[in-house]
Amino acid sequence: MSETLANLLKETRTFPPPAAIAAAANVTDAAYQEAADDRLAFWETQARRLEWTKPWDQVLDWSNPPFAKWFVGGELNVAWNCLDRHVAAGNGGKVAIHWEGEPGDTRTITYDDLLKSVSQAANYLTGLGVVAGDRVAIYLPMIPEAAVAMLACARLGATHSVVFGGFSADSLSNRINDATAKVVITADGGYRRGKPSGLKSIVDEALQSTPSVEHVLVVRRTGQDVAWGEKDLWWHETVEQASTEHEAQAFDAEHPLFILYTSGTTAKPKGILHTSGGYLTQAAYTHHAVFDLKPETDVYWCTADIGWVTGHSYIVYGPLANGATQVMYEGTPDTPSKSRFWEIVDRYKVSILYTAPTLIRTMMKWGADIPAGFDLSSLRILGSVGEPINPEAWMWYRETIGHNNTPVVDTWWQTETGAIMISPLPGVTAAKPGSAMTPLPGIVADVVDDQGKSVPDGGGGYLVLREPWPSMLRTIWGDDNRFVETYWSRFDGMYFAGDGAKKDDDGHIWLLGRVDDVMLVSGHNISTTEVESALVSHPSVAEAAVVGATDPTTGQAIVAFTIPRGNVDTAGDAGEALIQELRNHVAKTLGPIAKPRQIMLVAELPKTRSGKIMRRLLRDVAEHRSLGDVTTLQDSTVMDLIANGMKDSKSDD
Ligand code: WT7
């Protein structure tokens, strides 16, 4: 029988929760049984974490799959749940956001302050004619007004569409037009790598072709010169002059909350639609469970941008629904120096840190001596999201940042799932480095073969979700057929996520990358993630990206792009020797079938703005094709470097 996806990497280390975290954990082992006994009752219990103005009549309506309705008939206001109820409970003076600008300016925003700002924005938007159901596009840097704008929309029942501030005028106008947004909220600019970069100018360009937009609200952040048109309004002259009193009105549980376009690398972006009650329930529950948030004592920091779903669910909605105190940072991790993150952790005594593998591997590359100069003892839980985290990066995170006493939670989810789906629980799970471990209570995930049959422990295949979940996407905006086609047609009655995965011998789940990236080498389906992890497990390697290139003998051959760690000598013969050593290291770790045909030592890897490696481009390089579209690259010069390196480091065998 042929394997759907080979299972090559063996990892035997496990890290049980520290006794103190286990003893006081928000969620214990019992939650799994409770959810398994009655999944819908379990989610009802979690929905009661929120305050509803009208209770639901039915937990789940799944009579017309894949179109789900959760908490049918229930009503609530999302912003009220994130703000007013904390103020009403006497916590108005509590810090909601410790904001830190890239140039070093700071703002301390309490729940009282945030409620006032959101009320002002809601009042002013109402004055502009924004009503429930209208769409508002938000194109802002990581400043508090981004959260204010989102919550003001939520408060009014307007649907926000946040567009990441790094996107081009074209991407922005496409998204504005797809959602027919009426208002755009932006800033003059934002700070990145020490320089003010313009946003308003990009909006001006986008607005050449967006007939639906009536008004543009502009936050003054950098003070740079901007062109001014008749649709333009300064935020400080309008919103900040409005009344700070606003009465929130309740909306249906299924009222649209936001559209977020997925960062698809080629196809037309998909407007993922999320609604209110189920989304907020799962965002709040998972934030409470996976990060073990103690709102009285924890300081939480998620380093994602608000333009991605991580920023929606784990900066705005989850943490604020739970009354958390959090850090929000505007800039990049290397401005003004590579210790910026650790300065922030020590300054605010951050206790929960949620970041991405790409950042962890970058920190590894920079070297352990940088974080070693900081205390970091406030940290008690570390999280990872966005890509598979290689076992070595996981270990580095735990040891170097967590001083070997913090659980690491590797959280698998997607824009489409809305909230975390598969993750260890910090007070329960004996986590294995590199594994997302177990579906959360109330989530039914599986790994299946080509036929949709559950694979046995030790087998690999496709990651699917077998039951609907509260924060699931409801459709693709304006395109129900594409929703059904994209997510629900590969396997009967299952949501297919697009990811490959395996179950280890204990049944724990390991993510193996997008199935489109799987390599077919001499008849074996080999995961890029496993070969990358084998490379990163070598002490000289900080980061690796692996692709399959057409090969006359093996069908596809494995080509690896590898970034050495900071202190490694790669000049001349030393580089050649390292390449051979790495090829043998992979063969030894995973078996000869996984030995890369070629390894290239590079300084950078092409990444999307959310930090995912662009393997499509690397395949082009590996197959000597001309480069495809590089406009979504974080740094397009990286590709020149790699293409040049390619010429003189080709290895033969
Ligand atoms: C894709 C979703 C989820 C918020 C940020 C990304 C990959 C995400 C993990 C993880 C392995 C992961 C998957 C997924 N991914 N988290 N912990 N382990 N892979 O949201 O842009 O919608 O991307 O990111 O491939 O399908 P997104």
Image (spheres, rainbow, N blue to C red):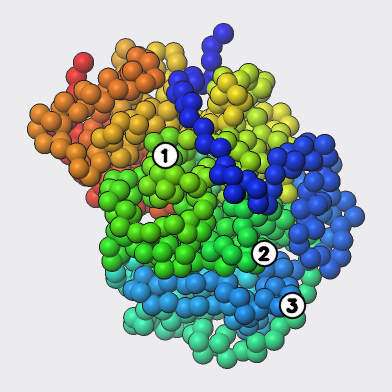
Q: Which residue lies at the image location 73% right of the left edge and 49% below the top edge?
A: 470
Q: Which residue lies under the disc numbered 2?
A: 321
Label 3 CA crowd tier, 10 Å (few <14, some 14–19, many 20+): few
Q: Which residue lies under the disc numbered 1?
A: 395
Q: Is residue 10 visible?
A: yes
Quadrant location, the C terminus = top left
- The kind of residue on which mark 1 rests is Met
Q: Earlier in the sequence, mark 1 or mark 3?
A: 3
Identify whether 593 is placed above or below 76. Answer: above
Q: Single out the mark in the foreground, 3 or 2.
A: 3
Q: Single out the mark in the foreground, 1 or 3.
A: 1
Q: Earlier in the sequence, mark 3 or mark 2?
A: 3
Residues under numbered marks 1 and 3 in contact, where contact means CB atoms less than 8 Å apart: no
Q: Which residue lies under the disc numbered 3?
A: 88
Q: Which residue lies at the image location 15% right of the left edge and 31% below the top edge?
A: 575
At mark 2, the secondary structure is helix
Q: Earlier in the sequence, mark 1 or mark 2?
A: 2
Disc 3 from disc 2: Cα separation: 13 Å
Q: Residue 410: x percent and y percent?
A: 52, 42
Q: Single out the mark in the foreground, 1 or 2.
A: 1
In the picture, measured across the screen, residue 536 lies left or right of residue 26, that is: left
Q: Residue 560: x percent and y percent?
A: 30, 30
